Amino acid sequence: MMRVGKMINSRAFGILSISTKSHNYSTSNLNYSTISNHKTSSELGIMVEAKIAPSMLSSDFANLASEAERMLTFGADWLHMDIMDGHFVPNLTIGAPVIESLRKHTKAYLDCHLMVTNPLDYVDQFGKAGASGFTFHVEVSKDNWPELVKQIKSKGMRPGVALKPGTPIEEVFPLLEGEHPVEMVLVMTVEPGFGGQKFMPDMMNKVRTLREKYPTLDIEVDGGLGPSTIDAAAAAGANCIVAGSSVFGAPEPAQVISLLRTSVNKAQKTC
Ligand code: DX5
Ligand code: ZN
């Protein structure tokens, strides 16, 4: 058991009761879905489950459905979908219509990372499209995050908040408290905008701080994760691992996915 004796955030602890063995979260009033044949956190004797989320930004977008299926067959828990508006970040990717199309082909948990200036404008369409998680950036949501989180939940999605490398971790603390807290924090380990960048080890201080304060929170890391960087992220306490180029570029992606999972589970057990 990890950090026994520490204060447990009861709200976050509730997440653990969600079964990830089936396609639907049983305790959810929402439409989250995921595919996983792996053991649950309680079966493993750990506080947080590993969620391995290949970033579809590195996939062949012309064959998105089969790429998604391929990753799930290789053992992915979630599919990470990078939504970029060409304004918040200097790149343009996909929007709700693509999520809607993909949703027709898979029941998987679609972990949507919105790198957009006006996330509130997209909640409704992403909800209708079938997004599972809706993670917005704190840098553009300081004034309206309570409303944003409320809306995300009301549309059947799971709210998460992301922060860029230059943003202090303290800025997400208020979003983890109160009536409508976020249920995941995404710590960017590269500047958002592009795949294939170098992992920033300094960001692990943020992950450690967060894990100390919230033992059961889903903490996601995104950018430059792969076999050579996973141990640092796992040791700091990250449990949701986004990996684009290291998975899609591997001769055997299943091996990389398995290695990422093993590292997280091992670190959780030794904490
Ligand atoms: C970057 C995106 C990432 C990206 C990660 O802005 O948020 O999800 O796809 O790619 P890798 O794993 O190649 O760094
Ligand atoms: Zn991302």
Image (cartoon, rainbow, N blue to C red):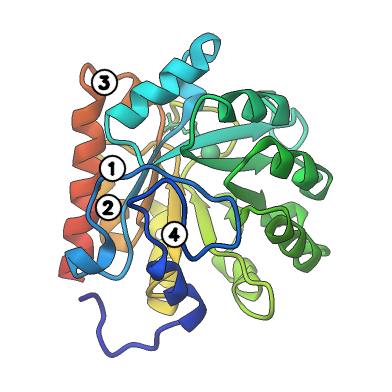
- Residue 219 is labelled as 4
**Lower position in the chain sequence, tag 4 or tag 3:** 4
- Residue highlighted by disc 3: 250
Residue type for callout 3: Ala
Q: CA distance from mark 3 to mark 1?
A: 15 Å
Packing grade of label 4 (10 A; few <14, some 14-19, many >=20) is many
Q: Nearer the viewer, residue 32 or 218?
A: 32
Packing grade of label 1 (10 A; few <14, some 14-19, many >=20) is some
- Residue highlighted by disc 2: 232
Q: Quadrant of the C terminus?
A: bottom left
Q: Quadrant of the N terminus?
A: bottom left
Residue 267 on image: x %, y %: 20, 61
**Lower position in the chain sequence, tag 1 or tag 4:** 4
Residue type for callout 4: Ile
- Residue highlighted by disc 1: 229
Name the front one of labels 1 and 4. Answer: 4
